[in-house]
Amino acid sequence: MTLDNIKEEIYSAKNIVILTHDIPDGDAIGSSLSLYLALKQLGKTVDVVIPKYSKTFEFLPGATEIKKEGAMEAYDLAIALDCGDIKRLNGFTNYFEDANCRICIDHHGINTMFGDYNFVDPTAPACCQILITVLKALEVEITKDIGTCLLTGIITDTGGFKYPGVKAETFEFVAELLNKGVNVSETYKTVLQTISKEKFELRKIAMNRIELLEEGKIAYTYILQEDEKKAGSEDHDGIVEMGRDIEGVEISIFLRETEKNNYKISLRSNNYVNVADISLLFNGGGHIRAAGGTITNMHLNKAKEKIINECKKHLK
Ligand code: 5GP
Ligand code: MN
């Protein structure tokens, strides 16, 4: 069984690198740090390599030990978390490819199975929920610190327990974490509610630009590099959800300029559109209700038209 192989590889490796997807969210960082703390408990030499992440997650146990690049050229073992495609490994594909053994633990429906061992469960609402099974198999003690990281991933990817992927076991596990002393309400507030003034300014700009199209079934907004400079924040988390939360909207589109004429696309849907399918046309992927991709070498107006036209085809 894959889980037995994973356990064996982790037990026999001396040095391990943990990698996750670019623009890491709470599930990516929560997964990485919970596994990091668990592997430290097992006496391993471990590097978590994440070049850049939101200030929101600086409170997490172990966050100060995150590295911007790896300390060695080739690791015994590389573990990719919350990442469906090797291309999204933060530009650190080399650490993954050069390791003696490669493991992928993930919950994306579209996962290219790029590890030697792939423990992938698309029905899990968060990668952190899969990690619970992995940590239990490794016989690691789930401490309050590890629990705080796991909870961060779960509340991020379930939108605070409100998305349809939430299962009874999600609550059962969180109940276990409460018993370990994890502060659920404080973690929830830090991760999902409190935003910096700069982030608030950026949200305001995006909110003012929301357009409702196709009889209100599509919400569209965008952020340019100059907006990020003006607001003093690059943290666009939560912007695409503002559009999705408007009554009658089925698809919310958010374009973020990454370089001149290049855009990162974020898509969300409410009821029936599979946005992961749409994202595949834009070199991307994701989940049925939350996905993303990219548009390159295109003026904003053209990019807007292109993504809206694709989305329109999926409306009822
Ligand atoms: P977000 O809109 O929050 O950036 O991403 C939503 C979901 O889509 C996440 O699960 C993320 O992993 C996935 N996603 C976003 N952008 C890409 C991309 O360029 N490629 C792939 N494969 N998945 C993406
Ligand atoms: Mn995730």
Image: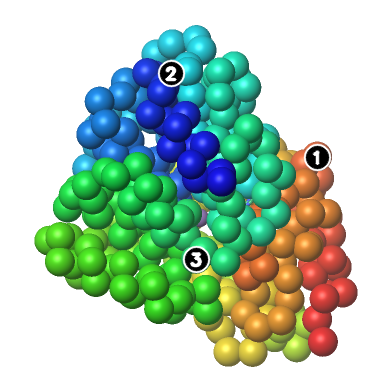
> Residue, x 37% and y 47% (percent of image)?
137
Q: Amino acid at mark 2?
A: Gly
Is mark 1 in CB contact (under 8 Å) with mark 3? no
Residue type at mark 3: give it: Pro
Binning the other alpha carbons within 10 Å of mark 1 as few (below 14), some (14 to 19) or many (20 upward) gives: few
Q: Position of residue 259 (x, y in %)?
A: 65, 37
Measure the C-alpha gap from mark 2 to mark 1: 32 Å
In this image, 177 relative to 150: left or right? left
Q: Nearer the viewer, mark 3 or mark 2?
A: 3
Whichever of labels 2 and 1 marks the residue nearer the N terminus, that label is: 2
From the viewer's perspective, is 188 left or right of 87? Answer: left
Q: Which residue is mark 3?
A: 125
- x, y (%) of residue 39? 31, 33
Kindly identify the residue that appears in the image at 48 percent across and 18 percent down. 76
Question: Is ligand 1 within 8 Å of the beta carbon of the residue shown at mark 1?
Answer: no
Task: Tell me which label, 1 or 3, sits earlier in the chain.
Answer: 3
Tell me the residue that label 1 is attached to.
Answer: 297
x then y, percent, for residue 219: 66, 75
Whether residue 133 is visible to the viewer of this picture, yes or no, is yes
The C terminus is located in which quarter?
bottom right
In the orientation shown, which residue stands out farthest toward the top?
73
Q: Secondary structure at mark 3?
A: loop
**Cα distance between the residues tagged 1 and 3:** 34 Å
